[in-house]
Image: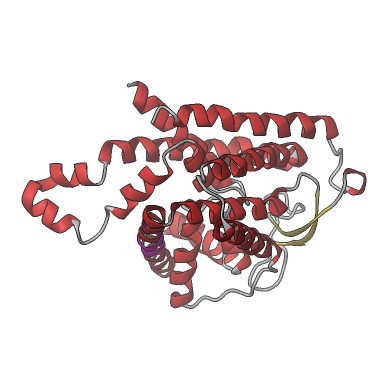
């Protein structure tokens, strides 16, 4: 029972993180001690399950995919996503600097935590950490692309975006944004598919889901292999990813560009006035912040709380 509750709490933390643009559930998985366990669980899905089923039936497959762990984790993630959609979305809309500050502190502490797992720092580790930082920083600076309605592009956008579930420091929703696919997949396809069950929309979601499945299978196997044979180098790269992603979650950011539909018009919320989503924002100092009260005291306090929360998650991870 205790293990079930702990795993669900970790899943909730991952699900909540996935709702935040610029924050990855993979980060939470790593600092809570379930990262490699999650990789191995995902990696278990594949053609290799067929001989297991023939030999041991459903019970053998359930054991092979670590079913109890997966159900507890996914259950927690669903609760976390629901919490994130309502609570975190509200806080981001009304107190954005404070929310970003919490995650800024959390990511800094997480990068330190991952870096501490490296047993030996050599030239290779240093180079890959710098390269990971540059790549992640560069991704946060990329202007959103035009996107495409091609089913091939939809497939690959799913494969690339889902990788953020596994890679610490990279957000799947942000990947969709820079690929120009966020509006097409979420606003123009997912909602109509769920509400009207339109065949053309369902086809797009099936192709996107197949891309996600392919991405999960590929990246999980690749990372499992690199962890097995190049653990220090892999950890150094992931540390760099997290450091580079800090550019995306700086507390004070002024919007420059917003989410637009296929006609180029800004997509508004239900009030018909407020833009639905910011695509591009520039980092500024508190004195130049245009979003209202800079909440400097709250930012400092929540940044410290975010930093300290990693130690709580790490303590939970030690129970794994």
296 displayed left or right of 263: right
Q: Is 218 in the magenta?
A: yes
**Quarter of image, res 299:** top right
In which quadrant is the C terminus drawn? top left
Q: Nearer the viewer, residue 127 or 297?
A: 127
Q: Which residues are magenta?
A: 214-220
Can you give x and y, in whole percent of width and height, for residue 70 in the image?
33, 41
Residue drawn at x 40%, y 66% as measured from the top left: 211
When the figure is inspected, residue 81 is found, relative to residue 224, above or below; the finding is: above
Kindly report the secondary structure that dominates the magenta region of the rendered protein. helix
Can you give x and y, in whole percent of width and height, for residue 309 in the image?
60, 30
Residue drawn at x 72%, y 68% as measured from the top left: 265
Which residue ends up furthest to the left in the rendered image?
Answer: 55
Can you give x and y, in whole percent of width and height, for residue 225 in the image?
36, 58
Q: Nearer the viewer, residue 88 or 270?
A: 88
When the figure is inspected, residue 87 is found, relative to residue 235, above or below; the finding is: above
Q: Is 272 in the magenta?
A: no
- Can residue 121 be seen in this snapshot? yes
Residue drawn at x 63%, y 38% as measured from the top left: 109
Which residue ends up furthest to the right in the rendered image?
Answer: 287
Residue drawn at x 27%, y 52% as measured from the top left: 44
In which quadrant is the N terminus drawn? top left
- Can residue 182 be seen in this snapshot? no
């Amino acid at each position: 029972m205790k293990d079930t509750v702990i795993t669900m709490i970790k899943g909730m933390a991952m699900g909540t993180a996935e709702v935040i643009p610029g924050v990855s559930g993979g980060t939470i998985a790593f600092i809570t001690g379930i990262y490699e366990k999650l990789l191995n669980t995902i990696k278990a899905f594949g053609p290799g399950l067929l001989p297991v089923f023939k030999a041991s039936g459903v019970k053998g497959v359930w054991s092979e995919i670590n079913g109890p762990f997966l159900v507890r984790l996914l259950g927690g993630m669903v609760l976390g996503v629901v919490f994130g959609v309502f609570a975190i979305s509200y806080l981001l809309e009304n107190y954005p600097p404070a929310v970003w500050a919490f995650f800024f502190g959390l990511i800094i502490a997480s990068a330190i935590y991952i870096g501490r797992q490296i047993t030996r720092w050599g030239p290779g580790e240093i180079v890959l950490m710098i390269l990971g930082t540059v790549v992640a920083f560069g991704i946060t600076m990329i202007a959103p692309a035009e996107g495409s309605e091609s089913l091939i592009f939809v497939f690959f956008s799913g494969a690339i975006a889902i990788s953020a579930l596994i890679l610490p420091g990279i957000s799947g929703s942000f990947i969709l944004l820079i690929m120009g696919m966020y509006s097409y997949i979420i606003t123009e396809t997912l909602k109509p598919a769920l509400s009207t069950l339109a065949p053309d929309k369902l086809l797009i979601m099936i192709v996107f889901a197949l891309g996600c499945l392919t991405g999960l299978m590929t990246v999980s196997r690749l990372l499992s292999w690199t962890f097995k044979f190049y653990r220090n180098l892999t950890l150094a790269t992931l540390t760099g990813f997290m450091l580079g992603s800090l550019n995306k979650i700086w507390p004070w950011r002024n919007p420059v560009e917003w989410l637009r539909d296929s006609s180029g018009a800004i997509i508004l919320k239900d009030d018909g006035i407020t833009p639905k989503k910011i695509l591009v924002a520039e980092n500024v100092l508190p004195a130049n912040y245009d979003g209202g009260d800079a909440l400097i005291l709250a930012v400092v306090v929540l940044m410290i709380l975010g930093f300290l929360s990693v130690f709580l998650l790490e303590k939970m991870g030690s129970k794994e």
